C-alpha cells in the first residue's frame, strides 16, 4: 500500500510537470464533495468507502475504475475501504469468483486489510430489520404471481395499482414471512415488499421487493436460508452496518437512490451513508458486462476468463498489462457524471508508456528468414554487447551471440523494394543491431514454389558495433538472432475482439457476437528468440526490439516458450491526439 501511495504521488507530480499552468490538478466531483464533507466535519471528518462486487464473474477494467476510485479516495483522505462481496444471489455466485476477485484487487495494488465482508454474513441482521419493517407497517407479504406483480407495477407513464394483499395485518405478515423463511412455500409463492407508493413517479419506489423465496443453497450459508434479500435492501443496510460514509456507485443506480435512502430511514439505522453516482467505464471494441463476458467464455468464443483478448483484469494481466498502467489509465480517464466510451487506444498508450520505462529489450524474430554471411568464419561466435534498456542505464547490458548463420524477420527483406522501403534488398547494405553492416548479394529460392529460402550476404568486418570507418551510411537497422543459438518460441498476436467500435449497439434481431473479429488471435509457431530468454519466467515482460511488448505466457514450458503480444510499438493514441480527436 505504501508503495502504491508513493507511486500515486509520483503520477501526480508528473502530471503537474506536464501542465505547469495549474498548481494542483482539479478534484473530480466526487473528491470535491468529499472534501466539502470533511471541511464541514460531516461524519467527524471520517471517510469510509467500499468496493462491492457481486461474485458472479471475474473483474474487468470497468471494475478497476471503481476500485481505483474507492481505494484511492480512502487513501487520499486517511480513510478506509472495505472489500464487500454482494453475495445475495445464490444461483449465479461461486467461491471461484470470490477468490479471483481478491487476487485481482491485490494485484491492482490495493489492500483491504481485515475489512473483508460478505453481505451473506448480514443475513440474520437483515432478516431482523425486515421483521421490524413488517411490525412498523412498512412491509408486507405479497402473494401475487411474478407476472401479476409486473402487471400491477404500471409503466413509466402509468401509475401502478396496489396489490390486494397490501393490507394484510402485521400478524398475518409476520406469520407468512416466518413460514417463507422456514421453507414452507415454493419459489415465487410469496415475496416481501416495502410499503411505499404504487403511484410514485419512480418505479423503484412502487413497493419494491425486499425478499424472495429461493430454495437454493448459498456458497457461504449453505442450506440455512430459503429466502434471500434483494439488492437494494441489502446494499443500503450493508453500507450502514459497515459505517460507510460515501457509497460510490455507477449511474444506473441514480434512480435507486430514493430507495436507498428509504431503506435506511425506515429501518431507523444509525449510520446513513451518502450515495454518489458516477459514470461507468465503457471501452471501444469490447464488451464489459459480466453476463456477456460469461457468455463468451462459456460459449467457447474465447479461451477462458483470462483470455488475453478480454477486458478482464486476469486477461489483461496474462496479456502483459501492469497494475501501474491500469491505475494510470484510471487516473487519466477521471471520474465524471456523464456516460461515454473511452478509446481503447488510451489503455494501450498507458501500457506502452509504462513498459517503455521498464521492459528489458531483447531481439526476437517472429517470421524467420535465414541469412548466411558468406565471408564470416564457420566456427566463429562473437558476443555482441546489447543495451538492456536505453530508458534505464541501471538495467545494464548483456551479451548476444553472433555467428555466420542468422535469422532476420521476413518483413525486413524485399526482393523488389517499393520506394520507401529502406530495409534489406538485393545489393543493399543495412546494419544489424549491435553487430555489423551486411550486404545482400543473392536470394536462394525453392525452385518449385518460388519461396525465398535464404539470403546470401557478406558482412564488413570493419563495421563492428554498427558504424563504418569511412563514414558511409545505411538507412535501416534490423534485429536478428543467431540461428545456432536462438531458442524456438510461439508468439500469439492479439487484435481487437470486436470489429465494431460499440459492439453492444445492435439492431433488433442482431447479436453482438456477430461483430466478433475472426482474426483476433494469430499464432506464430516458428519464432526464434535470443538465448538470454531461456530463463524467462511466466509473467515477465519484454520489448522485442522494433516490434512491441511481449509477455511470457503460463502455457510456456522450459523448452517451448510462448509469448503474448501485449501491444505493438506504434503509438496510435499519439496519432489520434495529434489529429485532435483526444478526449482530453
Ligand atoms: P456488470 O454490469 O459488468 O455485470 P456489475 O455492476 O453488475 O457489473 P458488480 O460486481 O456489481 O458488477 O460491480 C461492483 C462495483 O463495480 C459496483 O460498484 C459497480 O458499480 C462497479 N462497476 C461495475 N462495472 C463498472 C464499470 N464499467 N465502470 C465503473 N464501475 C463499474
Ligand atoms: Mg451489480
Image: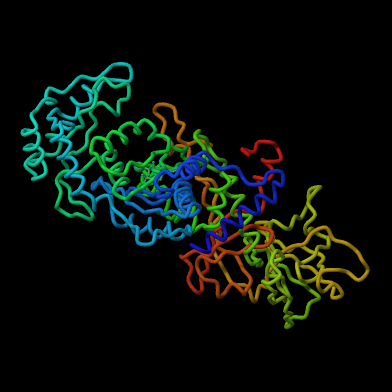
Q: Residue furthest right?
A: 470
As rendered, which of 3 and 528 lies closer to the eye?
3
Quadrant holding the C terminus: top right
Residue 344 in sight: yes
Q: Nearer the viewer, residue 421 or 88?
A: 88
Q: How is the image coloured?
A: rainbow
Q: Quadrant of ligand 1?
A: top left
Q: Position of residue 199 (x, y in %)?
A: 26, 19
Q: Is residue 221 above or below residue 180?
A: below
Please, is residue 286 above or below residue 202 in the view?
below
Residue 507 figure quarter: top left
Residue 201 is left or right of residue 276, and the answer is left
The picture quadrant where one finds residue 295 is: top left
The one of 78 and 498 positioned closer to us in this rendering: 78
The answer to which image quadrant residue 356 occupies is bottom right
Camera-side residue of 274 and 287: 274
Residue 414 in percent (x, y) is at 75, 55
- x then y, percent, for residue 350: 60, 51
Q: Is residue 199 left or right of residue 255?
A: left
Up the image or down, 270 lies above or below 355; here it is: above
* Residue 498 can be seen in this image: no
Q: Residue at x 28, y 43 (%)?
A: 270
Amino acid at each position: 500500500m505504501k508503495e502504491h501511495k508513493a507511486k500515486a504521488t509520483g503520477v501526480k507530480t508528473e502530471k503537474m510537470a506536464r501542465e505547469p499552468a495549474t498548481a494542483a490538478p482539479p478534484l473530480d466531483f466526487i473528491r470535491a464533495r468529499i472534501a466539502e464533507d470533511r471541511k464541514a466535519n460531516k461524519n467527524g471528518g471520517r471517510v469510509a468507502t467500499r468496493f462491492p462486487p457481486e461474485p458472479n464473474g471475474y473483474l474487468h477494467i470497468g471494475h478497476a475504475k471503481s476500485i481505483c476510485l474507492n481505494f484511492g479516495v480512502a487513501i487520499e483522505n486517511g480513510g478506509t475501504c472495505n472489500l464487500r462481496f454482494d453475495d445475495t444471489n445464490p444461483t449465479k455466485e461461486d467461491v471461484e469468483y470470490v477468490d479471483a476477485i481478491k487476487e485481482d484487487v491485490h494485484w491492482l495494488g490495493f489492500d483491504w486489510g481485515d475489512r473483508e465482508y460478505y453481505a451473506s454474513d448480514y443475513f440474520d441482521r437483515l432478516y431482523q430489520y425486515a421483521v421490524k419493517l413488517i411490525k412498523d407497517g412498512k412491509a408486507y407479504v405479497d402473494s401475487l404471481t411474478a407476472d401479476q406483480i409486473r402487471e400491477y407495477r404500471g409503466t413509466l407513464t402509468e401509475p401502478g395499482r396496489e396489490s390486494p394483499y397490501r393490507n394484510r395485518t402485521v400478524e398475518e405478515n409476520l406469520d407468512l414471512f416466518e413460514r417463507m423463511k422456514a421453507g414452507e412455500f415454493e419459489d415465487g409463492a410469496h415475496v416481501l415488499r416495502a410499503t411505499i407508493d404504487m403511484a410514485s413517479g419512480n418505479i423503484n419506489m412502487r413497493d419494491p421487493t425486499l425478499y424472495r423465496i429461493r430454495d437454493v443453497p448459498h456458497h457461504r450459508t449453505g442450506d440455512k436460508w430459503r429466502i434471500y434479500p434483494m439488492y437494494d435492501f441489502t446494499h443500503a443496510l450493508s453500507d450502514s452496518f459497515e459505517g460507510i460514509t460515501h457509497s460510490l456507485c455507477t449511474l444506473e443506480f441514480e434512480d435507486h437512490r430514493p430507495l436507498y435512502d428509504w431503506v435506511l430511514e425506515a429501518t431507523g439505522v444509525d449510520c446513513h451513508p451518502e450515495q454518489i453516482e458516477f459514470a461507468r467505464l465503457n471501452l471501444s471494441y469490447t464488451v464489459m458486462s459480466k453476463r456477456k463476458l460469461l457468455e463468451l467464455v462459456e460459449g467457447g468464443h474465447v479461451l477462458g476468463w483470462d483470455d488475453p483478448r478480454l477486458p478482464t483484469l486476469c486477461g489483461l494481466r496474462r496479456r502483459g498489462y501492469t497494475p501501474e498502467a491500469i491505475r494510470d489509465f484510471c487516473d487519466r480517464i477521471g471520474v465524471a457524471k456523464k456516460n461515454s466510451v473511452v478509446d481503447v487506444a488510451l489503455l494501450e498508450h498507458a501500457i506502452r508508456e509504462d513498459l517503455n520505462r521498464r521492459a528489458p529489450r531483447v531481439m526476437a524474430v517472429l517470421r524467420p528468414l535465414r541469412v548466411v554471411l558468406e565471408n564470416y568464419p564457420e566456427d566463429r561466435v562473437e558476443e555482441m554487447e546489447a543495451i538492456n534498456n536505453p530508458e534505464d542505464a541501471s538495467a545494464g547490458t548483456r551479451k548476444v551471440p553472433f555467428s555466420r548463420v542468422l535469422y532476420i524477420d521476413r518483413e525486413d527483406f524485399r526482393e523488389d523494394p517499393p520506394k520507401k522501403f529502406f530495409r534489406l534488398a538485393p545489393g543493399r547494405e543495412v546494419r544489424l543491431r549491435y553487430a555489423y553492416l551486411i550486404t545482400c548479394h543473392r536470394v536462394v529460392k525453392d525452385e518449385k514454389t518460388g519461396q525465398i529460402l535464404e539470403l546470401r550476404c557478406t558482412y564488413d568486418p570493419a563495421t563492428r558495433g554498427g558504424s563504418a570507418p569511412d563514414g558511409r551510411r545505411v538507412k535501416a537497422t534490423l534485429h536478428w538472432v543467431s540461428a545456432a543459438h536462438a531458442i524456438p518460441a510461439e508468439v500469439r498476436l492479439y487484435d481487437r475482439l470486436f470489429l465494431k467500435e460499440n459492439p453492444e449497439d445492435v439492431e433488433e434481431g442482431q447479436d453482438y457476437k456477430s461483430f466478433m473479429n475472426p482474426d483476433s488471435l494469430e499464432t506464430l509457431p516458428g519464432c526464434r528468440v535470443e538465448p538470454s530468454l531461456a530463463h524467462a519466467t511466466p509473467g515477465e515482460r519484454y520489448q522485442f526490439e522494433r516490434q512491441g511488448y511481449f509477455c511470457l505466457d503460463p502455457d510456456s514450458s522450459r523448452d517451448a516458450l510462448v509469448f503474448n503480444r501485449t501491444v505493438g510499438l506504434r503509438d496510435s493514441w499519439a496519432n489520434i491526439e495529434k489529429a485532435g480527436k483526444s478526449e482530453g
